[in-house]
Amino acid sequence: MRYKILSIGAALAAITACGDLTSINKNPNGPEDVDPPSILANALQDVAGNVDGVTSLNIRGAGLWSQFYAEIQYRDEDKYIVRSGTSGGWGFYNGDLEDFQRMIGKGVEANRPNWSAVGRIMKSYTFSVMTEAMGDLPYSQALKGDTVLQPAYDTQQVIYDSLFAALTRASTEIDLGPNALGFPSGDIMYGGDMARWQRFANSLRLRLALHLQKASPAKAASEAAAAVAAGVFASNADNAQIEFLATAPNQNPIYQDVHVGNRDDYGLSKTYVDSLTSWSDPRLPVFAQINQDTILANQTYQGLPNGLNDGEGPNLFYISRIGSMWRETPNAPLAFLTYSEVLFLEAEAAERGWIPGSATTFYNAAIRASMESYGIPDAAITAYLADSRVTYVPGATGLTQIAYQKWVSLYMQGMEAWTEVRRTGIPALVPGPRAVLASIPERLPYDDQEAVLNQTNLDAAVARQGFGASNDLTKPLWFTAR
């Protein structure tokens, strides 16, 4: 034993003499620093999965509360009971937002504006989702973990102003020249096409402008006009969406939940199915699967009422599941922002007199773009547009039509649908009979750990916004101005 101890001591002395005690903890094959093209792909996929996947920002929260879906089992969220640990995307702080901030810094350091521009765009997108989910947030002091351990919360108004500035800067700093250095690899959304990234920045700016229609109409009007003038999406080819792969582990997260996880927790909401059925919407067979009622041989599309207790409601064989495009297709895309949505935004902006153009033309084109993206035949689209209920009527009626048709088209983008329902009140969604709130939730909670790690700043933000607590779901956020 004595010789073994001496041998170990001699080895440690040798390592110390060489001044290399930490070398044994380093992975010689693991890179310590990488450029933005190596960062982007994973961050894009992660944000798409967390915003549009089986999370509180879509199927298990925002999209559920927009009544696209209904919970088949474990129905707490369908009754507006949010489980501990749920937040409005707080985990982005120590993951994807750090990556986007790193891209910005590296772009500035290396004088590669396309790197920093893409970082700014995706940082802005991610923060927009988070503030619209939770309210005031650490923003100006965030992502400075080496110097600021307890960041103050910025108001939602300040955050919006910062996002407009960041998107404007990103759009203008993008270099479209033939010798520009961008993303020869890693860009799984646009394949390095910086012109489409530029249109995404402007289109996101337009979305955020319309979000402020009630809270700050003058700001909304000016930002909308500037965004459109700078150039927004021009076709479905511009859609900001992530195409997943057919092979694991990079498959669509909804497919992974159903097939890999063997889950069957969600069906279609009765609200959504009944609405699309009554309007003879040709997208219903895409959005929903026909039910499995082989007993009565009445296979059709049927939704589950929201807000029931476990075991209540119709036999689950009668309930339509989420469409096979997502449940059974591993490489189905998930969208951040689409051409169809941009056209609806332009329709509303034109109706309000903020931009030139015909609200009717934008509105019809928006419905057509949505249906074409799902492969709906032209004859079916034309027939739908000819329905007297669909035909655009200028004025207040038209604004209601825009809001309703946008809600329908935002299926699988639950977070944005929830944002629009809170802003416009359309459609007027009624909570289920076992819901614990009298209306749909207005926000998602802050992270539970903030009460331990950053309590003073958290308490100040909660008090400033008039919340009853950090997990209060009932107080409208600033941007809804209610």
Image (cartoon, grey):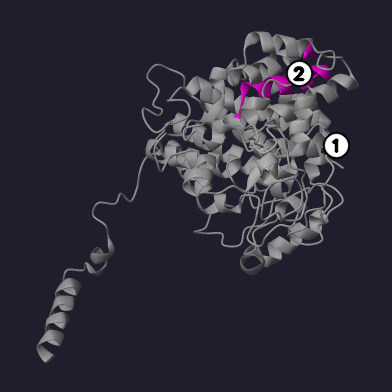
In the rendered image, the quadrant that contains the C terminus is: top right
Q: Earlier in the sequence, mark 1 or mark 2?
A: 2
196 or 10, nearer to the observer: 196
Secondary structure type for disc 2? helix
Query: Where's residue 116, x and y in %?
Result: 48, 35
**Where are the magenta residues, as a range?**
337-360
Query: Residue at position x 82%, y 14% from top?
Result: 392
| Tag 2 residue | 347
Mark number displayed over residue 419: none
Query: Tags 1 and 2 in contact by the CB under 8 Å rule?
Result: no
Q: Is residue 353 magenta?
A: yes
Query: Where's residue 134, x and y in %?
Result: 71, 50
Q: Which amino acid, by three-letter code, is at mark 1?
A: Ala
Question: Total marks drawn?
Answer: 2
Query: Where's residue 227, x and y in %?
Result: 67, 23
| Tag 1 residue | 428
Query: Where's residue 11, x and y in %?
Result: 14, 76
In the rendered image, the quadrant that contains the N terminus is: bottom left
Instruction: Give the left or right position of residue 442, taking residue 187 as reference.
Output: right
Q: Quick check: can you spot residue 108?
A: yes
Instruction: Give the left or right position of residue 100, taking residue 38 as reference.
Output: right
64 or 156, nearer to the observer: 64
Q: Which amino acid, by three-letter code, is at mark 2?
A: Ala
